[in-house]
Image (spheres, grey):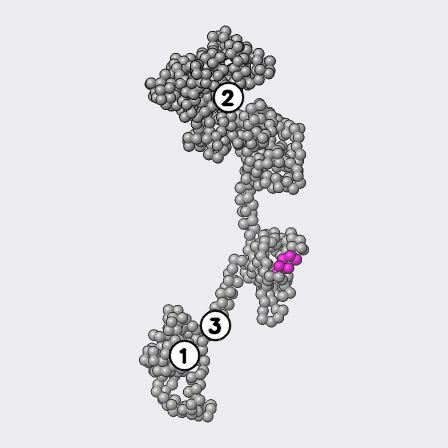
Amino acid sequence: MPDTPDHDHQPVNLRDPRLALLAAYTPNMVMITDDAGCFEWVNPSFEKHTGYALSDLKGKRVGDVLFGEDTDPQTVRRIRQKLYENAAFEEDLLQYTRSGAPYWVHIHGFPIGQEQGVKPGFIAIQNNISDRKNSERGLRIAASVFDRSHEAVLITDHNNRILDVNPAFSRITGYSRNEVLGLNPAILSSGRHTPEYYRSMWHTIEQTDHWRGEIWNRRKNGEEYAELLSISRVHLDQPGQFYHVAAFSDITALKNHARELDRAANYDVLTGLPNRQLLEERLRTARSHADRLRRGLSVCYLDLDGFHTVNERFGHTAGDEALKTLAERLTRTLRSGDIVARIGGDEFVLLLQSETTDPVFQRILSTVGVPLTLGDESVTLTGSLGITRYPDDNSDAEGLIRHADQAMYSAKEKGRNQFHFFDPCLDEHRRKRRSQLMDITRALENEEFELYFQPQIHLPDGAITGFEALIRWNHPELGLLAPGSFLPAVENSHLEVPMGQWVVKEAIHQLNRWREAGTPLAISINISAQHLMDRSFTDFIETYLRLHPDLDPGLITLEVLESTALEDTQRAGNVLSRCRCLGLKVALDDFGTGFSSLTYLRTLPVDMIKIDQSFVFNMLEDASDRAIVESVIFLAQRFAHPVLAEGVETIAQAHALKQMGCKFVQGYGIARPMPADDVLDWTLQWQRQVRDDDSGTLKTNPAASFFQR
């Protein structure tokens, strides 16, 4: 390369190897183009930054290689204009590497040619200024965010003096920028917060360099507002140098809206009283408080008696005014800490957090009874009050309200203007009964029930007159259960009729099996009161008998408890008469335990009287029981009804009954109830032992031996 003269310096030898080293090692990117703007040479730094090798670039136009979609076309036009004018230029330009990554350069270009003694073209020297450009962009963005942010921003020095605020600060607080520069942000303090609050806030900032929370401040016009505030401590490189940057937004409207939502969600619109949701929340808190203090509380459910007539007579507007007045009266009546809530149209719940006695509940009812003026009339209301007491009733909040509601209905059954206490023990019994009924329903579906049979014997000759069908439950976990463990739960429930129908069908089915086996046996079936009085009872019996035309209905005896027809003797008599018309027999079970035994003997169509085992058991030791047994037998004989004594366990009892004129017995002294599959074998054995045995063989069954005498 020839030497190029310089007007200000001595000529330089361009062939000096040191100049080649300079071009090779300079961090600046250097490129030389021809006069058409095509690459002729680039230095190693250019290759390293762009990813292009010199061999890749020779003969290519600069713009075709380095420019991209975000390269500023105005800057490119200015550069090209300078090239056209053969003039030097200096610009900042966005270029792209071979991999497509953008980078900023500061480019200084100048023409070369005849003046320098070289071929015409251009030399361009580029510096990578991406970091500076990114910093400038960040500053511009930060400045834009600072100015346009909807959040107020203020910056303070380490002495907490305001250095700058943004327009949003002025818009929220009412203070202009010039009014607050150099001041402490405490000028905004509302006075609501204690010094301890601020000390805690600054302690957190010193420990973590950050604090965030809600705070109440005051605008320039004196109006208080709520703000969500975030304070950050920004440290500089110099030790001990830091700034505070605080950003906050006005959340007053949100707080007001939240209060409105809270009121809508937790308070009754008409009366302003807590609603059920808030009541349950406060009741949970009250339970915890009562536990800590080992005190009780009362939950009272108040329902106005017949309030619908007020709405019908005076209109709903007047009814609403009456409810509002009553709500105010109840609130004034209660002591501090007690709560009144409205949870329905005319239903209120009162939470009494102190010891309560009957006069307190009476005072509540008296408050309801204070006359109201509706229109031109004076109206007196009454209420029914249900009460449950915690911790006697150790239920959760929802359960306490529900139990008080149940007690309220019991109060209504007493009449107007009454209160009633919930009984946890009774409720526990009901829950257990519901659970047991569910288990029994499942047992019916899974065929877990079975009939056992106990023989009934004719005393004079020991002949088997029949078997009483007795239900048993093959419980999958508890084993075989006697009827006393589950039938009381079934009584007067929705299962009484389905279970009774199952017993009837199963008993008749077993009767058929014995008939087909060549041993026709009679059978007695216990019929409950609800089953007998069910309107479909006789139709069900008649339909089922039709399904077994070969079965003799006379082998079936329906055993009806004496108490069955206590309320409707005439209807019970009609049902039993129809059953007898179908060929069935009827026995009056547990005779002597009811209240109208003589009436039943006179009016009910029965074929046999059964003496309750409770009298038979002690009749040899208790003169009163013996007198009852004798009286029942005497009465039955006068009405021409045979008598069967239950619960016979000893030969002595059988002897005594025979002497009194009782002709039929059953009990453990004869045999315990047995499965159906054992009945035929037992029957054959019994008959064999009762018959006269000329061989003189020793009898193994004492009861059977008794009937040989």
Q: Nearer the viewer, mark 3 or mark 2?
A: 2
Classify residue 363 as left or right of residue 544. Answer: right
Q: Which secondary structure is most common in the magenta stretch?
A: helix
Q: Is residue 322 above or below residue 558?
A: below
Q: Which residues are magenta?
A: 199-205
Residue at position x 47%, y 71% from top?
133
Q: Is residue 34 shown above or below 585?
A: below
The disc at residue 131 is 3
Q: Nearer the viewer, residue 377 or 202?
A: 202
Marks 3 and 2: CB-CB under 8 Å? no
Q: Helix, strand, or loop for circle 2? A: loop
Residue at the disc numbered 2:
668
CB under 8 Å between callouts 1 and 3? no
Query: In which quarter of the view is residue 404 placed?
Result: top right
Q: Nearer the viewer, mark 1 or mark 3?
A: 1
Dot 3 or dot 2: first in sequence order is 3
Q: CA distance from mark 3 to mark 2?
A: 107 Å
The answer for how far apart the CA atoms under marks 1 and 3 are is 18 Å
Q: Is residue 509 within the magenta segment? A: no
Task: Answer above or below: position of 677 versus 567.
Answer: below
- Mark 2 neighbour density, 10 Å: few (under 14) some (14–19) many (20 or more): some
Using the image, tell me which numbered label, if any, was put on residue 46. 1
Give percent across and percent down for residue 691. 43, 15
Residue 204 is one of the magenta-drawn residues: yes
> How many residues crowd around disc 1 within 10 Å: few (fewer than 14), some, or many (20 or more)?
many
Tag 3's secondary structure?
A: helix
- Left or right for 524, reference 208: left
Position of residue 648 measured from the top left corner of the image (x, y, whole percent):
52, 18
